[in-house]
Image (tube, rainbow, N blue to C red):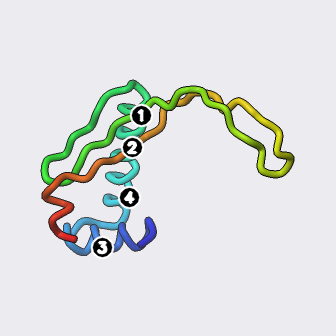
């Protein structure tokens, strides 16, 4: 399912216009992104948890040349589904 299909389904189930659903989705994504950039956790009951994970600097290998390189440290977004969500699969 892509974004357009998601918006159609949300619009159908909520009886809101596609324009309103798009605005809500954009706002939700913006809030999630900003919250994760601040290093905070977003927990949604019966759905899951969004958080960031720190990956330390490490050594890697360039597959084209075989040369060793240093991969910079970074914070990466993660999602952990709740047990309730997992039970549906």
The answer to whether mark 4 and mark 2 are in CB contact below 8 A is: no
Residue 50: image location, x then y, percent: 31, 42
45 with respect to 49 (left or right):
left
Dot 3 or dot 1: first in sequence order is 3
Dot 3 or dot 2: first in sequence order is 3
The answer to whether mark 1 and mark 4 are in CB contact below 8 A is: no
Question: What's the distance in space between the residues labelled 3 and 2, CA to CA?
Answer: 25 Å
Question: What's the distance in space between the residues labelled 3 and 1, CA to CA?
Answer: 31 Å
Residue position marked by numbered label 1 in the rendering: 53
Dot 4 or dot 2: first in sequence order is 4
SS at circle 1: strand
Question: What's the distance in space between the residues labelled 1 and 4, CA to CA?
Answer: 29 Å
- Give residue 12's mark: none
Badge 3: how crowded within 10 Å, few (<14), some, or many (20+)? Answer: some
Q: Is residue 86 above or below residue 13?
A: above
In this orientation, which residue lies closer to the viewer: 62 or 10? 62
Mark 4 or mark 2, which is nearer to you?
Answer: 2
- Give residue 22's mark: 4
Mark 3 or mark 1, which is nearer to you?
Answer: 1
Task: Say which residue appears at 40% left-offset and 73% top-offset.
Answer: 5
Q: Is residue 63 above or below residue 42?
A: below
Question: What's the distance in space between the residues labelled 1 and 2, CA to CA?
Answer: 7 Å
Position of the C terminus by quadrant: bottom left
């Amino acid at each position: 399912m892509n974004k357009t299909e998601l918006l159609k389904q949300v619009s159908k189930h909520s009886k809101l216009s596609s324009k309103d659903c798009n605005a809500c989705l954009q706002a939700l994504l913006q809030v999630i992104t900003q919250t994760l950039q601040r290093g905070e956790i977003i927990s949604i009951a019966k759905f899951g948890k969004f958080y960031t994970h720190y990956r330390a600097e490490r050594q890697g290998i360039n597959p084209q040349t075989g040369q060793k390189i240093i991969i910079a440290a970074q914070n990466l977004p993660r999602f952990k589904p709740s047990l309730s969500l997992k039970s549906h699969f």
